[in-house]
Image (cartoon, rainbow, N blue to C red):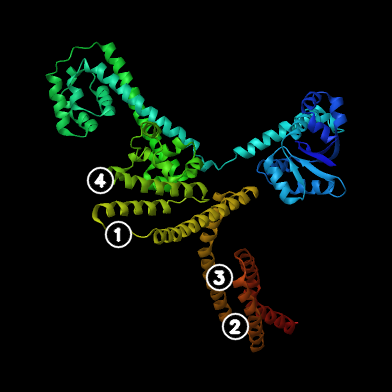
Amino acid sequence: MVVLHVLFEHAAGYALFAVKEVEEIGMLLPQVEASVLNVGKFNSMVSLAAFFPFKSAQAALENMNAISEGVVHADLKLFLETNLPRSGKKKAVLGVSDSKVGAALQEEFDVSIQTGGVVAEVIRGIRLHFHSLVKGLTGLAASKAQLGLGHSYSRAKVKFNVNRVDNMIIQSIALLDQLDKDINTFSMRVREWYGYHFPELIKIVADNSMYCRLTQLIGNRKELSEESLESLEEVVMDSAKAQAILDASRSSMGMDISPIDLINIERFSTRVVSLAEYRLGLQEYLRSRMSQVAPNLAALIGEVVGARLISHAGSLTNLAKYPASTVQILGAEKALFRALKTRGNTPKYGLIFHSTFIGRAATKNKGRISRYLANKCTIASRIDCFSDIPTSVFGDKLREQVEERLSFYETGELPRKNVDVMKEAVKEATDVMAEVKRKLKKEKKRKKREKELDENGDTNGEVKVKVEEEEANTPVVKKKKKKEAEETVAAEEPAAENGADETPGKKKKKRKAETEEAPDIKEEETETPSKKKKKVKTESVEAEPKDESPETPVTEKKKKKKKSAD
């Protein structure tokens, strides 16, 4: 007897259902399809064996990611080990909706897995009546859980590094191509419109943006004079061409133009000039994005061609998955299928034809160099796609290899071996990556320090001011020490003069007092300037009674004389 258990993954948790009368259900599939819609009949066929609710939204997301990748999560493993009956006379069969998960479960457990047939119909019924089969779960709660998990799963899938987005490259290269077409069309319109008034200017100036700027500058050709020659030279960047424009304006065959027509032509040419300037800015933006997203591909084949390859492939990841033979003819699909249909020669190159290498190669070597270049482009795109820290070291080395191969076809000089070049590239790349990591670590530390200072209420400016104050205070302390030393010397000089009047016993006492005060002076030198100020005050107070000491013997003599007179 076979016992069928069906595993159902829901946003609320894992559920294990036991299916009754599996042989009869297996035979009567049309009846099963009809009975799935009826809750009562479906409950008689299927019963809930176990339910494992997810503890949090994060746990639900982790399990969902594991199931989508065909991996058995620890929660699912524990749930099935606990609740799936594997011992007994009856043979257990586990029904799973996804074949990848089924293969992973078969490796983990010694259980036969069933994915098709009746399992699909049973899971359809479970999905329809899940909230009624699980006690305590309402339809509203189940739909909320599904909605929340769906949003979090989508956000997790869409998450990416902002600096490594190839969508911006695809959009910018498409806009660049569109701008080229639009600027060309609009400038031709300006040429045709202004050509009625000044037809000779078309032959003199070939560049579209320069022609539009000259249209703005010249206006009415009859107003051109020798004074406007300098301004013409600034636009044209050629004195001979500026003189030719001036001469042509004097002998032009064009018709006269009204001021209102001239205003409209000038407005339109201003728009065309602004578009041309915007195109230059967009090209610079594309260059910077390519250096961040695909630096090796940009270094090898150029920013514009590399961006076109990424755009044509759909993404950098898709380009990295392509073999070199596909990259070689990428962009020449029509020619390829036409050649296959007519049994003619297949194309040798597609978008990579716009690189400088194929243009520099001889006609007989164009196919060879395109095949070699496509090989190196594939390597560069894979390095860019799967490297954590983008560097252009490998792209530069691959470019050197293509240059060497080109010179080999022309001169016969043998190029370096690929192994040696890649060893050099790996060594340089590790050094560059170490340097980048060190800079990132420094930047993190600096940001952390700034954050701590902001939390403490201090700013970088205040800290700098404090440091400057400390540096400024250091020489002041030295000056104070000098002043204190001079004051002590000045105080000692009158004491030495007064010492002549004192007795020898008092001199001995003074010497003892000075020796006792000597260690105190040493301590003062090590103390802070604020404490030194206090001590200087106390010393000045103590110096006053010392100055009075020579007066004491005079008063004693007077007292003795009074006593003798009495």
| Amino acid beneath label 4 | Ala
Residue at the spot of label 4? 362
Residue at figure coordinates x 22%, y 12% from the top left: 257
First in sequence: mark 1 vs mark 3: 1
The quadrant of the rendering that contains the N terminus is top right
Residue at the spot of label 1? 414
Q: Which numbered mark, 4 or 3, is in the foreground of this view?
A: 4
Please indicate whether residue 89 sits to the left or right of residue 189 in the image.
right
Tell which of 388 and 14 is nearer to you. Answer: 14
Q: Residue 183: x, y in percent?
A: 34, 25
In this rendering, the answer to whether 411 lies above or below 237 is below
Tell which of 551 and 232 is nearer to you. Answer: 232
Q: Residues within 10 Å of mark 4 (few under 14, many from 20)?
A: few
| Amino acid beneath label 3 | Glu
Number of the label disc, if any, that sits on residue 484: 3
Q: Residue 271: x, y in percent?
A: 35, 23
Q: Residues within 10 Å of mark 1 (few under 14, many from 20)?
A: few
Are the residues tagged 2 and 3 within 8 Å (C-beta)?
Answer: no
Tell which of 406 and 235 is nearer to you. Answer: 406
User: Looking at the image, can residue 284 be seen?
Assistant: yes
In this rendering, the answer to whether 175 lies above or below 548 is above
Q: Residue 199: x, y in percent?
A: 19, 19
First in sequence: mark 4 vs mark 2: 4
Q: Residues within 10 Å of mark 3 (few under 14, many from 20)?
A: some
Are the residues tagged 4 and 1 within 8 Å (C-beta)?
Answer: no
Residue at the spot of label 2? 499
First in sequence: mark 4 vs mark 3: 4
